[in-house]
Image (tube, rainbow, N blue to C red):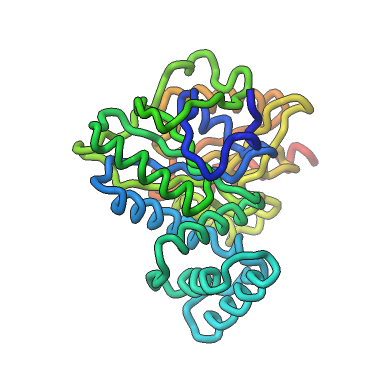
Amino acid sequence: MPSWAELPIGQVVRLDADPDAVALALDPLPDDAPAVVTYFAAGERSVADLAASVLRELDKAAIALFPAWLPGAEGIEGPSGVNVAAVQALALRRASVTGHFGPFLAELARRALTGAPSALAPEVRAAGLVRVLADSFGRARLAVLVRVPDGLGAAAREVLVAGCEWLAHRGRAGVWLAGAPLHDDRVRTIATPLPANPLPAAAVGAREAVPVPGTADRAPAVAYPPVAGRPHPGSASERALEAALSARAWAGGRAWNQTYRPGPLAVPIRVDLLWERERCVVEINGPDHRAPAKFAADRQRDVLLQLDGYAVLRFPDAQVMTDMDTVVRQIGQFLRNRRRAEG
C-alpha cells in the first residue's frame, strides 16, 4: 500500500476507500501527505462551469487563509492604499525567493484586502492557487479530494472527469476522486493509505449523504483544514467564540486547532480549542458531526482524551452563534474549577 506521499500529483485517480474514511484519516494531515482540500462536486453542465466553480472555491479558501501564505502580512487589515501597497510589496518579495508567480501573488494579496475580482487567466489562477494553498499548510504539494455525488448521468460524469483533468494538468494538483463510482476507463483506481482501523466499528460502511444534482442541494463548496493556532477561517462559530474569549482574562492560555497525540504509537487527534495546563478541550460541532462515521469517531476521540485526563466540552455551532453567553459561562466555570482544584 502506498504512503500519502506516493499518491500521484498532476493526475486524476480514484481512491478505493469510503470518502468519510479518507476524510477522517486526513484530519489532522499526516506528516507525509500533501495539503488536501475537499471539493463537493454538484454535476456542473460543462467543463468551463466546473473549472470556474473549482477556481471560485479555491480562491475563497486562499483569501480566507490570508495571511498564512504571506509571512509578514500578519496584522495588516483593511483596504487602505498603504495596506494594499504593503502586502503587494511583501508578495513580490516572497515570489522572488520562492518561485511563486509574482503578478499572481501580488494580485491575490491585494484582493485579500479589497475583495476585488481577479483579472488573470484561469490557467494562471489554477497554478497559483494550488501553490498558495499548499503553502498555507506548510506543504510543497496540494491534492483536491473530489467527493463524487450519487446520481450523476453519463454527460455529468464526462464533465467531471474532463474538468478534473484540466485542474490536475493546469494546476499541477493531485485530484483524488472518492464517492459514487464513475465507470470511466481514463481514471485508474489506486490503493489508499488508510490506518488499519480508520473508523470505529459502528461506523464502518456508514456514509454521510452527498447532495444529488437536481435536488435542493447546496452550491459547490471546498472544505479545507484549519491552520494551527487560529480559529478556522471558514468557521463562523470558531471565529465568534474567539472574539468572545479574547475579552475574558480567564481565557488566557488557549490554543486553537492543535494536534494532540495520546501516546507514541497512537493516531494523532486534532482538537478545536485547547487549554493544555487545565487539560480542557472544547469542540464545536457542525451538522457534519451528526453523520454516523463522524459521530462514532467523535466518541472514540473523546474516550482517548478522557483516558489521558482531558475533559471534552462539546457545543453545537448553532448554540455558539445564538447563545454565546451560556457557552462562554460554562467554559469559564470549568476552567475556574480546574484551577481551584489544582491549587
Q: Residue at x 62, y 51 (%)?
A: 137
Q: Give how far across and how far down residue 44 sits, in percent.
A: 27, 45
Q: Front-most of 199 and 316?
A: 199
Q: Is residue 114 above or below residue 123?
A: below
Q: In which quarter of the view is residue 91 placed?
A: bottom right
In the rendered view of the protein, which quadrant contains the N terminus?
top right
Q: Relative to 19, is 70 on the left or the right?
A: right
Q: Give how far across and how far down residue 225 sits, in percent.
A: 55, 45
Q: Give how far across and how far down residue 121 sits, in percent.
A: 40, 66
Q: Residue furthest front?
A: 185
Q: Is residue 235 above or below residue 149?
A: below
| Res. 114 in view | yes
Q: Residue at x 55, y 18 (%)?
A: 200
Q: Residue furthest top?
A: 201
Q: Is residue 144 above or below residue 307?
A: below
Q: Residue at x 27, y 40 (%)?
A: 43
Q: Front-most of 52 and 297?
A: 52
Q: Front-most of 199 and 169?
A: 169
Q: Relative to 203, is 94 on the left or the right?
A: right
In the rendered view of the protein, which quadrant contains the C terminus?
top right
> How many marks are shown on the rendered structure?
0
Q: Relative to 6, is 39 on the left or the right?
A: left
Q: In which quarter of the view is residue 318 placed?
A: top left
Q: Give how far across and how far down residue 306 sits, in percent.
A: 66, 26
Q: Is residue 291 above or below residue 230?
A: above
